[in-house]
Image (cartoon, helix red, strand yellow):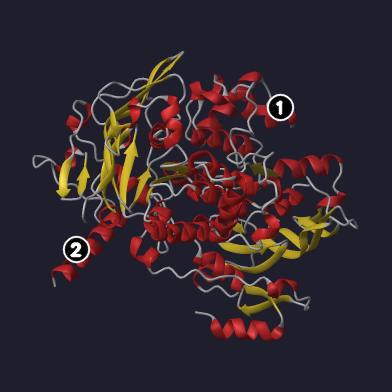
Amino acid sequence: MTESIPKKLIELKDLQLYFNQGKANEVRAIDHVSFDIYEGEIFGLVGESGSGKTTIGRSILKLYEPTAGDILFEGKDISYLKGKQLSDFRKKAQMIFQDPQASLNGRMKVRDIIAEGIDVNKLATSKSDRDQKVQKLLDLVGLNKDHATRYPHEFSGGQRQRIGIARALAVDPKFIIADEPISALDVSIQAQVVNLMKELQKRHSLTYLFIAHDLSMVKYISDRIGVMHWGKLLEIGSADAVYNHPLHPYTKSLLSAIPVPDPEVEKARQHIDYDTHIETDGKERTMIEVNEGHFVLATAEEAAEYKAQQI
Amino acid sequence: MMSNPILKVENLHVNFNTYAGTVQAIRDVSFDLNKGETLAIVGESGSGKSVTTKTLMGLNAKNAVIPENSRLIFKDRNLLDLKEEEWQSVRGNEIAMIFQDPMTSLDPTMKIGMQIAEPLIKHRHIKKEAALTRALELMKGVGIPNAEEHINDYPHQWSGGMRQRAVVAIALAADPEILIADEPTTALDVTIQAQILTLMKKLQQETESSIIFITHDLGVVAGMADRVAVMYAGKIVEYGTVDEIFFNPQHPYTWGLLNSMPTTDTQVGTLEAIPGTPPDLLEPPKGDAFAARNVYALGIDSKQEPPFFKVSETHFAATWLLDERAPKVIPPVQIQKRWAHWLEMQGQEAY
């Protein structure tokens, strides 16, 4: 980020989302989380199942109502959006889902799946304009024009994910949330989809929130990474800082568990166990900037300790 | 490596008759499994790795056709000749399996302790009380905390990682000679995956069982396997020791697989995908099935199937690139790095 001051596209301010609030089975899915996503960047959000990463993505798209806190899109609080502003927002923010099988309607032709957003937002002037737009989108994601008249089941997993990407791009969005977009795909196909997403991001100056549990892929694609656990954001920083110079014990543990395709590295692997005690002892912790742009959730003493231990 | 095969798979073919025609899922697969080793079978969906293991468990669908000359030799008998009653004494007893999804492979209506004791009662004819005592030991063995309190729990009360531990305990209950693990950790978080893999390694050392490990995750393979077989379109295309496959790979498909995973030093923009998709096994292509996706394909690849070329006593690859008449090709940068490391390793050993 060497250019002038980067513009904030998304701002999360002390976001909280509790399910079953006030009841015995209350779940704090998002627990006081704040971070920004800058325009044109790929922000990677990692964490294990139940960490709240998907809930954050869905809250940004207004699929959940936060318990407290604000979500700002282009400086505007999304919870107050109505009418034209709301439909504009829905156009600008799109989503790519994990399971391309489940997220495509099996009874619709690929052309109609991709054009659904175009139809809803009345972006096509005529039928031929609509067909042309679909054609262009298919081209963009590496499918060909005779694919338009087929049904989702006729495609492989990787191709289906391309259809999902084309659908998201149909309304010319600014911001895309990709929730585990590659974890249902084969290794050889994962790289195809990730490369496609990267290329599209550059060409259309898109901003991504890339949600995944596979830290090695997240590190590869992201500019910045946030690490979540039990509804809290524990660490945030540049991809290089979080991956190569982690601060929080949880991040270290997570990194030590990633299998690497190298037998020598694997033989030498030392798995670091994570002591959850530091999340449950009830002490007051805040996001502390340890190095420039690299924050960790800690007490002042812990932050000093993490910094001293940093590799 | 001393070769002491406990299982020999010879010329295995598996076809499925479907309404659309015959799917040739396994097209001539042969391999040995040695005592106490972990053999990883790697490949993408549709490569035939899961069909291979289902065949080893006698669990193929009814429309599967296995030709006469296919042989699975285990303890001096051909498993393919077994009747269903005979299979039942092998399955879960001498050969056990760990499935991918711990939710669907456990019985939701049966207490976990009983599910672990079941193979002992069935195969070892141990009384229920004694079997449950053994089940408790197994639960402790796979690291379930406060096992006594949880022996009467149902699967839905447990987390995914704990459930997969229960699945491991069931598979180990009858002390099998061969353990087949089909993507045992794919559904789990990385931290839980690391725990289960460590557990499997530890238990293998204690019981000296052989493991066939099916996965598409090369990172997991690097940590678990002694030997690796790479499958593509129903065939093994390369096999060797884990070091040979990771540091001296010869088949362009193996290169592609290794290349499409980011390593710690992968720089932005260097992740190379394998273009295209796997072939349709209703009509397998003539010649080398990988040719259509292979940037290193030679003219002969579309005409004639490559035989296995010997790289070392333990390492074979089916690619025409190893024929002495083939032109020398320069593999991708990441593979060149791996090769350079291999030469270093060889140098150290010679020294």
- Read off the chain for label 2: B
Left or right for B215, reference A83? left
Which amino acid type is shown beneath numbered disc 2? Leu
The residue type indicated by label 1 comes to: Asp
Answer whether residue B139 is visible to the viewer in this image: yes
Residue pictured at 51% horizontal, 57% vertical: B196
The image quadrant that residue B51 belongs to is: top left
Measured as percent of width and height from the top left, residue B43 is found at: 38, 41
Pinpoint residue A223: horizontal percent, then vertical percent. 55, 61
Regarding residue A177, the answer to whether it shows in the image is: no
- Front residue of A148/B150: it is B150
Residue B28, image quadrant: top left
Q: Does residue A173 lie above or below B17 as drawn?
A: below
Q: Quadrant of the C terminus of chain B?
A: bottom left
Residue corresponding to mark 2: B343
Can marks 2 and 1 be said to lie on one chain? no
Residue A73's image quarter? Answer: bottom right
Residue at the image point whose x is 27% and y is 21% from the top: B68
Q: Can you say whether B284 is above or below B240 in the image?
A: above
Numbered label tally:
2
At mark 1, the secondary structure is helix
Classed neighbour count for the residue bearing mark 2: other residues with Cα under 10 Å, few (<14), some (14–19), many (≥20): few
Mark 1 sits on what residue? Answer: A119
What residue is at 45 percent from the left and 37 percent from the top?
B91
| Rendered view: B290 above or below A16 | above
Position of residue A266 in the picture relative to residue A183 (left or right): left
Please state the chain letter of the residue tagged with numbered disc 1 in the rendered image.
A
Q: Which disc number belongs to residue A202?
A: none
Label 2: which secondary element? helix
